[in-house]
Amino acid sequence: MDTTSASDEGEPANNNHSYFRILVFCTCIAFLFSCKQPKKELPPAPPPGPDTLVIEKKPAATTDTIAKKPMGKKKIYLTFDDGPNKGTRNVLQVSKEENVPISFFIVGKHVFDSPEQKATWELLKADTSIVMCNHSYTHAGGQYTRFYSNPAGVVADIRSCQEKLAFPNYVVRMPGRNAWRIADIRVTDIKESRAAIDSVYQAGFDVMGWDIEWSFDHKTLSPDTATGILLRRIRNMLDAGTTKTPGHLVLLAHDQAFQKTNDISMLVSFLRELKSNEDYEFILAGKYPRLRRVPE
């Protein structure tokens, strides 16, 4: 006869539950005990040794701590071509009244074309506030392609003008071409003219072109009236440093464009606008940087 009761068969299950309860209780006690323990503080970092790289945070720069780089004035070279002619005396008079130095690029033949032009030339020579430079003797006779096809003839033409008029410098502007040969500035606008212009430079002349032109109507001889645009372009070129020599701008205009009263008044207004900018100063062409022969 089997004497085992139902309660005896259930004991192993009850014992397992008891062990589980005890395990949970002990775990909770251990957790509560660890929470009450004070946290251990880390020891302070040792001072940096001689080989330790220490990076210091610098205070942010302010407008008071940033040194401003001094900037010199921007140089403007006012150059007028093709004189002496009917507009030359007007340009000279404006130059004197406004106290603005102007450089005249002279066509040798024009000096001897009439007594009036010869007299204008004498007026220019007597004025020490301006300078005159070589713009060839014949101005190519208007036949530019033929003129530049003969490099030796171009050099002879330039030399003839230099010898007859005795300019105080060796600065040349090529007729009908915006070309440069000054130090490392090498610009040829029409490549067929390169050999002739190289020959002029090799003959001892510095060739000056221009950075910006005040254009005029070749029929009416009146200058372009959009002087506001011209002034803005001058400012932008100087600010951006896009002239042939940064900080130096050569402006080309023409004497013959300033024969009428309104056109002369426009020239005066234009010069006064430039003069109002304290960042600008006016320099004669003979003082352009890196010329090989600088007048005394």
Image (spheres, helix red, strand yellow):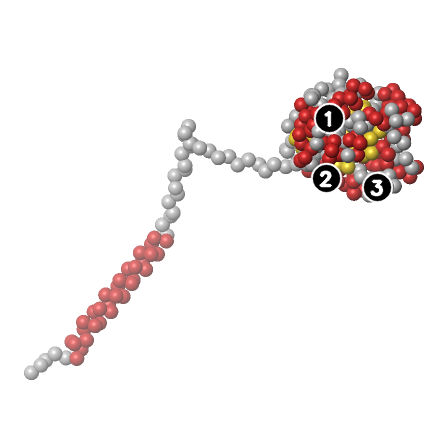
Q: Would residue 218 be visible to someone looking at this image?
A: yes
x, y (%) of residue 100? 83, 28
Q: Kindly identify the residue that appears in the image at 35 percent across and 56 percent down.
A: 32
**Three-letter amino acid code of the residue under disc 3:** Asp
Q: Position of residue 266 (x, y in %)?
A: 87, 38
Which of the two discs, 2 and 3, labels the residue nearer the N terminus? 3
* Quadrant assignment, res 140: top right
Three-letter residue code for mark 1: Gly
Q: How many marks?
A: 3
Q: Which residue is mark 3?
A: 217
The one nearer the camera, 249 or 291, is 291
In this picture, residue 172 sits left or right of residue 12: right
| Residue that numbered label 2 is attached to | 236
Whole-number angstrom distance, CA of label 2 to CA of label 3:
25 Å
Residue 153, labelled with which disc? Answer: 1
Residue 79 in sight in this render: no
Amino acid type, residue under disc 2 in the picture = Asn
Q: Position of residue 270 (x, y in %)?
A: 84, 37
User: Residue 107 occupies which quadrant of the picture?
Assistant: top right
Q: Is residue 71 above or below residue 27?
A: above
> What is the x, y in percent for residue 206?
71, 25
Secondary structure, mark 1, is helix
